[in-house]
Amino acid sequence: MPAVLPVLATRLSTAAATAFGSAYGELDPELRSATKPEFGHYQSNLALRLGNALRRPPREIAAGLVEALDVTDLCQPVEIAGPGFLNLTLLPSILAAAVNEPVTFTSRQQRVVVDYSQPNVAKQMHVGHLRSTVIGDALCNVLAFVGYDVIRQNHVGDWGTQYGMMIEQLLEEDLDPETLDLRGLQLLYERSRKHFDADGTFADKSRARVVLLQAGDPETRASWRRMVDVSLDDFDQVYALLGSQLTRDDVVGESAYNDDLPRIVDELTQAGLLTESDGALCAFLPGFTGRDGQPLPVIVRKSDGGFGYSATDLAAVRHRVATLHADRIVYVVDHRQALHFDQIFTLARAAGWLPPTTAAEHVGFGTVLGPDGKPFKTRAGGTVKLTTLLDEAVARADALLEGREGIDRQATAKAVGIGAVKYADLSSDRVNDYVFDFDRMVAMTGNTGPYLQYAHARLTRLLSKANEQGGEIKELKEPTEERLALLLTGFPDVVLQVAETLQPHRLCTYLYDVATALSAFYEHCPVLTSEGETRASRIALCTATRKVLHDGLGLLGMAAPDAM
Ligand code: ARG
């Protein structure tokens, strides 16, 4: 019975209904973890809510609630505090049982599609893509853990007018596309861009080449395919280094929707949602206006007949609902695209592609900043190569491990370095910008990845010395062990919150609290040197703590080395 909280919440609702009428059973009992140990384990504001609704003194209501409340099998006598708060404290045996019980979730029979990472072909992945990848992986882990059927979609930027000019440039220079590597591709892009801007004939040829590409001309497609493959190989290297879940099977790039685009226009036209404006086909949605009061249209087909980013995203929504049968669609993309997704979701709903029963959520995130507080760039102003960044993190972690014995130095440095980068990204509210600061992220103290990994490794070492697993937690006498146990029972609840709010930092904060409570426990409660029941019980508490840290780090996409 790991989830005591929902059981108590239901009991409170029942008491409200019994004492004050069935309608009051519908009120949220507002049962939360107590803010201070002297308030017990949980506190509820229900009496204050009821007092408001019934216009009666909350303390009087609280007394009525306690009278009707049946929790003697779970709690110590309920206390009324202050203006009418209810303080609940679990019986020690119930608390112990709640920690002992394994955490399980059953399938929800719900499918969630998560669109994340999404780098662009012929370009370096940048730190924004790093954020999307790290946050997306963590969310997929959490959603799967709580029982969703998760489908990952890497909506790679592999389509658009730039390929026309790159292929044209390739032909003009008589370059063999097979010889291109990522660097070569980037340089090719730069040359073709200059050429395009300077030479009208070349620009026309490039546009004609785009038409050939979209129409499926075999030779043009082959050159394009090569460019995509070179880039995907490069992305795979970053994913491997990061330990990302993403595979080639998850790549469903913009190009995949090419054949659906004319139908998108047809269906929107039939629904009367498109207006011609300067030769382009646009959707003007109510409520979308700029600062100057001018309408902000969604451009579905450009005046030259080409389709852009919006059309592709509309086709993607349609596909995810109609073919992938998504119940929930999640987009992990930086917050500057908030308006774009707001428009896409609104238009897709109007078109009937996104039914009211399917949730669509833009999981926005802030910018990664350099030490100067400006968006993270190289000194020359270019994008920072991700592999360089990750290698540096691993090197710093390696230095941190200097002198440690009995560890696999290379593997541990990788686990710690990559973990540090991920944790730094995940631990603050994702909507905020954050400064990429190696010194802070690889620190062994504070709310960092290495601190949590160390807490786990230290527990592992302690448990290996104990020569027993401890069986079940039987007694929780000391306040610090009680506090740790109580925190552990909150794990399923936190994970559910992350699945709901899509805010991984809640799990980070929770794990940090667990690690901090563990330190306090070590300080006050000897484990290996204690005896009998106490020893066995404390070892069991350590085993349970280790499991929560291990599983929690795993959900964040971080390794939990056994020694460091
Ligand atoms: N490739 C885009 C970029 O780098 C992000 C794509 C986000 N996903 C989507 N379905 N639009 O900005």
Image: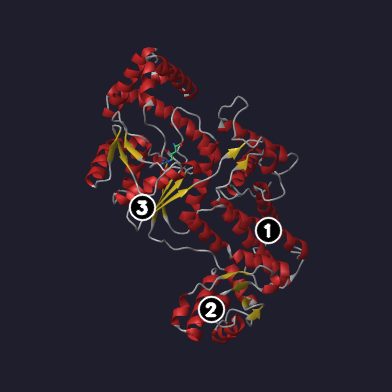
- Where 80 sits versus 36, above or below? below
Query: Percent x, y for residue 385?
Result: 56, 30
Distance from the alpha carbon under mark 2 to that under mark 3: 39 Å
Query: Percent x, y for residue 54?
Result: 52, 81
Q: Residue at x 59, y 80 (%)?
A: 58
Look at the numbered disc 3 and give the secondary structure of its residue: loop
* Total numbered labels placed on residues in the image: 3
Q: Which residue is mark 1?
A: 463
Q: Ligand 1 is found in which quarter of the picture?
A: top left
**Amino acid type assigned to the residue bearing label 1 in the image:** Leu
**Amino acid type assigned to the residue bearing label 2 in the image:** Leu
- Where 305 sits versus 24, above or below? above
Q: Residue furthest front?
A: 292
Which numbered tag is attached to residue 424? none
Going from N to C along the chain, the mark reached first, 1 or 3, is 3
Q: Which residue is mark 2?
A: 50
Query: Percent x, y for residue 405?
Result: 73, 43
Q: Which residue is mark 3?
A: 326
| Dot in front, 1 or 2 | 2
**Amino acid type assigned to the residue bearing label 3 in the image:** Ala
Q: How is the image coloured?
A: secondary structure
| Dot in front, 1 or 3 | 3
Q: Residue at x 54, y 81 (%)?
A: 55
Going from N to C along the chain, the mark reached first, 1 or 2, is 2
Distance from the alpha carbon under mark 1 to that under mark 3: 43 Å
